[in-house]
Amino acid sequence: MQELNGEKTSKAKKERIPMPEQPAEERRKNFNEVALGYTKEDALAEASRCLSCKEPKCVEGCPVNVDIPGFIKLICEEDFSGAIEKIKGTNALPAICGRVCPQETQCEALCVLGKKGQSVAIGRLERFCADYEHQQGVKVPEIPELTGKKVAVVGSGPAGLTAAADLVKMGHKVTVFESLHKAGGVLSYGIPEFRLPKEIVRQEVKYIKQLGVEFKLNYIIGRIKTLDELCDEFDAVFMGTGAGLPSFMGIPGENFNGVYSANEFLTRVNLMKAYDPEYDTRVRLGKHVVVVGGGNVAMDAARSALRLGAEEVSIVYRRGEEEMPARREEIEHAKEEGITFRLLTNPVRILGDEKFNATAVECIKMELGEPDKSGRRSPVPVEGSEFTIPADVVVIAIGTSPNPMIFKGSEGLDQNKKGTVVADEETGATSKCGVFAGGDVVTGAATVISAMGAGKKAAKAIDEYLKEQ
């Protein structure tokens, strides 16, 4: 009998149960969800692979500390209600996390089975439990008596939703302020329907409302009220405003018609339903679309453009595929759908016609040189390798920073050179008394689950802070 780190693995299958998906030729023409989810039989078979380790490393890789072996054991016992209850003990957004969390670099990366084969598909099992609950009816836990303390949460993205859910379960009165007309933040405006159906986001937000959290939409902090005014009205404030200000390359031609930031492009597609002919938010595409960037946002923009009817969509990235920050799954899905990858390539200017419409992107070939400060090899231009790519639309997806609007009319909140808020890594405490922050507004653009982890830490710290008042 083979042993792995002291755990018996003779009965464990090396390969995980595959997730059913829409065929590439079909899905590239629609916005329906690509991954179709596990059946009950799939979930039971996959859960049976778990070794129930005595010292589960997988939990160490989860930013919100889900009891992974615990909920998987309940799946094996066919107690799906118990499994989702255990998950939601620490994770208020399981249906979302099960779809977009990069488990392969977190909990699944530490799974013992991954050393000899494929790790347990933890994310897929989490999604199964969450979808099962939504089909059966969501149960709302009892909330303790109110403490009399009031907390303002600015932003309804993953950090804000997590902090709000935890704080209300601690007995505090929580009000979430959202600048857009729908709650969810990047979950609503940034991630496409085919990866994260908006009905899923709506259901998760509904659950948090049922916990007792109040939402104020179309409410821009920094304009309607300042952060200072919130501090006067509430006992504590959590900033989970994300990083909604797009970055551009600063190259000639970025002001041409047809050049979008990924934020605007995806907001039109997701929140404003640009893919629906009944809406007046259509995006002018033409035949050729070029997306600049190599992260998940770039993949989302490229795959959305394809579904909107572009004949050719190219991703232009200045490094190689191994250096791409996007999830492997998203890269593979994009390839399967016919997206062209132009790697080790960097735009130098955008060309246009006499009507200021984009017509092409002039690029230069790159090669990888010495590692930069982040440890990645720096791309270096190859002299004389310039060429052009036809482009009716160009989408810039190279990063974001916090929107400065949130800071207007407020004093005493420290920021760094990138415009992000300076906050304690463990508590989210800022330089401004009673104000905590977490997620992309602190770290810059990162993952949904890391923002949730920050919201969770901040909620605990806020609760301790309020108890001392």
Image: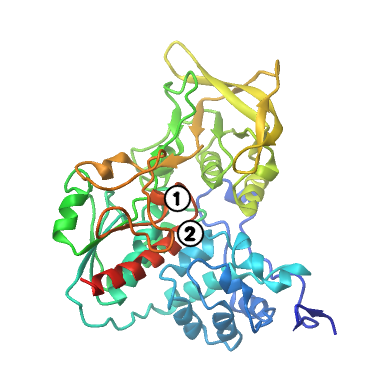
Proximity of marks 2 and 1: CB atoms separated by less than 8 Å: yes
> Identity of the amino acid at label 2?
Ser
Mark 1 closeness class: few <14, some 14–19, many ≥20 residues within 10 Å: many
Q: Amino acid at mark 1?
A: Thr
Q: Residue at x 48, y 85 (%)?
A: 82
Q: Is residue 8 above or below residue 26?
A: below
Instruction: Please count the marks in the image.
Output: 2
> Residue 97 appears at what percent x and percent y?
49, 64
User: Relative to 147, does residue 323 appear above or below in the rendering?
Assistant: above
Q: Quadrant of residue 199?
A: bottom left
User: Which numbered dot is residue 443?
Assistant: 1
Residue tagged 2: 450
The crowd level at tag 2 (other Cα within 10 Å; few <14, some 14-19, many 20+) is many
In this rendered view, identify the residue nearer to me: 106 or 428: 428
Report whether 225 appears left or right of 213: left
Task: Identify the residue at the far top of this view.
Answer: 354
